Amino acid sequence: MNKKPRLSKSVRELWPKLTTAALDLLFPGAVFCASCGTKLKTAERYICTDCLEQITLVKEPVCLKCNRPLTRPGYCRECRVRPRSFARAWSAAVYKGALRQCLHRFKYSHGAYLAPFLGELLANHLEKVDNLPPQLLVIPVPLDSQRLKERGFNQAQLLAEEVARLWGWPLDTKILRRVRATLPQADLKAADRWRNVEGAFAASRRLMGKQILLVDDIYTTGATAEAASQALKDAGASAVYIATVAIASSHPHGRDK
Amino acid sequence: MPVLISLTLLLATGIATSSYLPLTWWLVSGAAVLVLGFWAAVRNNRLLVSIIILLLAFLTGAVRMALVTAWPDQLAHYKDRIVTIEGTVVREAQPATTGTTYVLAVEHIGESKLEPASGRVLLRDIRTEGETYFYGDLVRVRGKLIKPQGAANFGQFDYRAYLERRGIKYQLAVSAPEDIQYLAQDRGHPLVAYLLRARERYLQVIDVLPSVDAALLKALILGERNLVSPEIADFFTASGIVHLMAVSGVHVGLVATLALWVGSLLHLPFALKSLASAIIVGIYIVWTGFTASAARAGIMFLIGLLGQAAGRPRNSLVALAAAAGILLLINPWNLYDIGFQLSFAAAVGILYLVPLVPSAEHKWQRWLTPFVTSLAAQLTTWPLTAYYFSGVSLVGCVASVLAIPVASLILAIGLLGLLVGAWYLPVAQVLLGAAGLALTALTFLARWFAQLPGAFLYVKRPPVVFMLLYYTVFFAAPYFLWSKRGNIRRRRFLFAAMALVLLAISWRGPVTPVLTVDFLAVGQGDAILIQSPSGQAALIDTGPRQNLGDSIFDAGEKILLPYLRAQGIHRLELVFISHGDSDHAGGAPAVISALPVGAVMVPATFDGIGADLVKKETEQRGVPLYPATRGLKVDLGDGVEITVLSPPSEPIVSDSPDNDNSLVLYLKYGQTTFLFTGDAGWPTEEYLLKSGFPGTAQVLKVAHHGAATATSDQFLAELKPMLAVISVGKNNFGHPSPATMERLINHGVGIVRTDQAGQVQIKSDGRILQVSTFANPRGEQQ
């Protein structure tokens, strides 16, 4: 923070360093827990120890397709009846309690600074995954352009950047696009969610034989993941894997309970 | 601690210590440290570079302040001369006690031939009628360039220093219409001019309200307090919600929220929405006159937006430190500005203390949050309000909880009304009518809380040591109380006990019992406060009450009461009034009406306008009024004895019986002796010489402000005073007379004058006298 930027030959190199130094000075780190809002202690970052302990990591047995926690190994009912064009979905933790608060802050309350924390949570989970392909092209689920304007950032893209950085994988944020406007999934019932996103995505160029890691924040019904993965498959991707920070423990209509 | 907070604290320390060394010293050491810094940077010595950066922050503060104080004063040459000034209005008309005031940026000045110069002058326009001038108008004025009135008593509000902190060193009063001429317009910054014109247009809408409501609304929306009646302002002060009349976080936050909300309604993209709200907040701050508290809130809002745009976590304490740093760099005098100090103290309290409170577990606990917030602000600001205003509102934290939502509502409706009203008045009338209703509710709240018993407490001016200790304890407390290492209970107990003992000791101050006699500087008149070691207090005379044309100067209200309150005096055992002239008795009614008084002692021949008002007031308050004659003795506790030496039971017959029958009082405490003579002249002195003194007097209050008709050689030879105090101000009587001064000098008596030295304070432990004055506070022993 009080590091003096070293004298470098070109101003072009110096400028970003200076702005980063200035930003570090003004925003040295989070002071309050992103989940419960209490003051963080010296050793804590982003979230307090109590809340961190509350985050329920996804543990076996899970659905072998969508990673949803189950009571016995196998496939969940949803994955048995729905088409699943993606190879496998992974998510780090269950969407409830402290993590739910965190993701809420991340998306709706100026929480872009939480991306390293949530991205790391996801990247760490991928380490524990069986049969992880050695090289994946990381692609974020694109955000509706209207919402991108209002929010100022795409949360999936921030997460994808973190995952790509931590795993050393290539990242492409341009290739997958939304071809029509959609409503926010969170506002809809499960049945409407499929209709809302069906055919909403398209890949802008061919992806012959590529293995893709599609990154998003939350996996609920799998409708968004399915629609996006379908678009990538259509562009020629050989396999699509889904990675989300959180997975809803049940369907919004509660059928899987 | 985040780096930026350390840097800002060091910057402030640099500003505070700047005056101890001259500018060149600071510059030289700054340059030396810079060179050392480059060397360390080249050697890649991280630790040294860090230390040097911290040191540079300190030196920046010192150099910045030294630059401001050492700036050449181009107007000094014209001080106390009749000059003509051509200058631009940079601050528009503000109503004052008499007439209106402007601030002029001087362009040309001269006695006959005008020469270019720069500097700022407070223009006091006391013409009975005439046009007003706007920002950017060039005017030519003629009058005497003088220094504004400074403080002369310990702890008194220093108007001269207040203006100098704003870059204004002189004032010039204009009373004749021909002394002010309008020359040209639009000489100011076009953007500021445009914003102020717009402000004018919007503000005119407020005038659809009755004037009382309009004044209050202007105060709430723009922090313009000058038009609010003192009565209503007092209610707001006593109920502890006067902070609403200074534009601060509440106001700026609301304006920002409204702007962002409108942006969201219009589905503006994030960048555009932020930019628009930043501009709106900026305009609002210019409208409020760029006060420290408004600027603080505005800068913090902008930093918040920046953090959002950069995806950085919010850290409000760091943003607060950044705001402080920016404001101090712009004008380092801000450090001594009351508004700056109060605003930052309140913000620190809220941002530092509130998060320490455990988060709410039950829903009903959330309702406590506003209360906790107000309490936090109260806890960090009360030492400052005690220091500056000798008073603390005890109901403030409760009143604020209720008042802030009402004020926010008023602000929202009011602002909306102004914006709409500038285009279509009928809608504004409805909106402002609603705001008027809310204003009534707010006034009712203020009045109700102000009139609760014990709502407002006068406390003595806290010693600076106490304040430093208080804030240290405050910020150290969480580390001791919340840290979970070691023996928690014992450490908490030890910390609390130590803190309380230290605070109590520092509040009390030095405990050696002394007699304190204060000759207050009240202008032409007498006012002497006696505090005995036992804590009892008495006054001898109460200063003048003068009619200054269209305003009244009452020394009792303006000087005595604030001083008594700052000293923590809540009761006067006795008030001696030497005689009925208004320069001695004038301030008495104000004092008697505000403080419990044991008794008022006057001579039997107590007459005149001043006397009549005193008689009326004592009768109304039920305070006994005793005529005192020679031989009366009063014990003020711990061996402080006051004896009446004159008048005799038969009044002295002379040409001026009022003056010559003044109370003459002899004070004795151990070996320390004083003689207070009122306005007594030669006939009284003859009588005193004839009837004899109880002893010599070490300190003589020279009679009649040093008039030639008193203080004879014989009198001085008999009394053998070491020190003569002349209580005198600007006057047309030629006081003090050169003849009297010569007599005093011939007798080898030391002389102090309140018109030159300001307040004279004499302390005694019964043997040694300690004399200090406002001009020489460290004083000397005799």
Image (tube, helix red, strand yellow):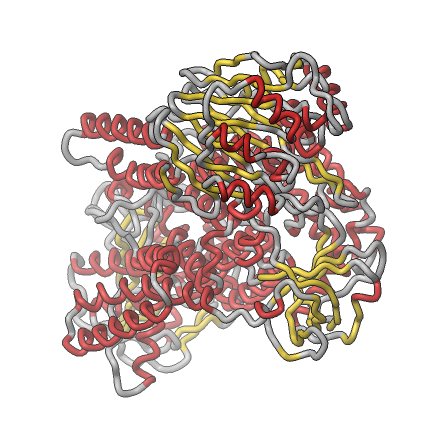
- For the point 44% across and 15% down, the residue is B637
Residue in front for this viewpoint, B728 or B568: B728
B445 left or right of A179 in image: right
Q: Position of residue A6 (x, y in %)?
A: 24, 78
Q: Is residue B411 above or below residue B473?
A: below
Residue in front for this viewpoint, B566 or B757: B757
Residue in front for this viewpoint, B169 or B318: B169
B652 left or right of A106 in image: right
Q: Position of residue B684 (x, y in %)?
A: 64, 25
- For the point 20% across and 35% down, the residue is B484
B440 left or right of B596 in image: right
Q: Position of residue B12 (x, y in %)?
A: 38, 56
Q: Is residue B416 above or below residue B691?
A: below
- For the point 71% across and 23% down, the residue is B614
Residue B413 at least partly seen: no
| Quarter where residue B170 is shown | bottom right
- For the point 49% across and 43% down, the residue is B746
Q: Quadrant of the N terminus of chain A?
A: bottom left
Q: Position of residue B135 (x, y in %)?
A: 71, 67
B717 left or right of A26 in image: right
Total number of numbered labels? 0
Residue B638 at least partly seen: yes
Q: Is residue B558 above or below residue B428?
A: above
Q: What is the residue that sits farthest to the bottom in this orientation?
A: A9
Q: Quadrant of the C terminus of chain A?
A: top left
